[in-house]
Image (cartoon, rainbow, N blue to C red):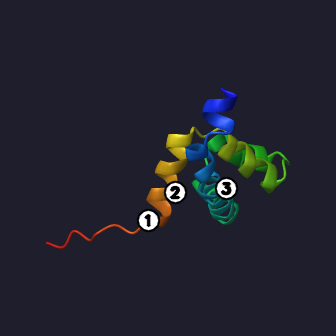
Amino acid sequence: MFEQVYTNPIAKAQEEKAEKLVERLYRYYEEHLVEMPALQQKMIEEGTPVQTAVCDYISSMSDRFAIKKFNELFVPRTWDVI
């Protein structure tokens, strides 16, 4: 695991991208609380700090899901004009 993931040059090359992806998702959800799942919204209503609830949500995401959400939120798509 150490050689294949933690010190692998291919994986290390993606590290900065992954950090920026998480930072961008964090800022987005911190400003758009209503777009988080009901569980995190309830946590906030019950007194959990917003920052903790947002971190909880993002940390529960798989890599693929985080990338999918990032693409949905920030990557432009072509317009379907009919």
Using the image as rendered, state which of residue 20 and residue 16 is in the foreground. 16
Residue 22 in view in this figure = yes
Q: Residue furthest left?
A: 82
Q: Looking at the picture, which amino acid does disc 2 mark?
A: Phe
Q: Residues within 10 Å of mark 3 (few under 14, many from 20)?
A: few
Three-letter residue code for mark 3: Glu
Camera-side residue: 7 or 52?
7
- The amino acid on which the numbered mark 1 sits, given as a three-letter code, is Val
Check if mark 3's residue and mark 2's residue have beta carbons within 8 Å: no
Q: Quadrant of residue 20?
A: bottom right
Tell me the residue that label 2 is attached to.
Answer: 70
- The residue closer to the viewer here, 70 or 30, is 70
Residue 18 place in picture, x, y as percent = 61, 53
The mark nearer the N terminus, 3 or 2, is 3
Where is residue 43 shown, x and y percent of the image?
A: 77, 44
Classify mark 1: residues with Cα within 10 Å, few (<14), some (14-19) or many (20+): few
What whole-number distance in Å separates the C-alpha atoms at marks 1 and 2? 7 Å
- What's the mark number on residue 75? 1
| Crowding at mark 2 (Cα within 10 Å: few <14, some 14-19, many 20+) | some
Q: Residue at x 51, y 50 (%)?
A: 67
Residue 19 image-quadrant placement? bottom right
Tag 3 and tag 1, C-beta contact below 8 Å: no
Q: Is residue 72 above or below residue 38?
A: below
Drawn side of residue 36 relative to residue 69, left or right: right
Query: In whole angstroms, how far apart are the C-alphas of marks 3 and 2?
Result: 12 Å
Quarter of the image with the N terminus is top right
The residue lying at 49 percent from left, 62 percent from top is 73
N-terminal-most mark, 3 or 1? 3
Q: Is disc 3 placed on a helix, strand or loop?
A: helix
Residue 19, numbered circle? 3
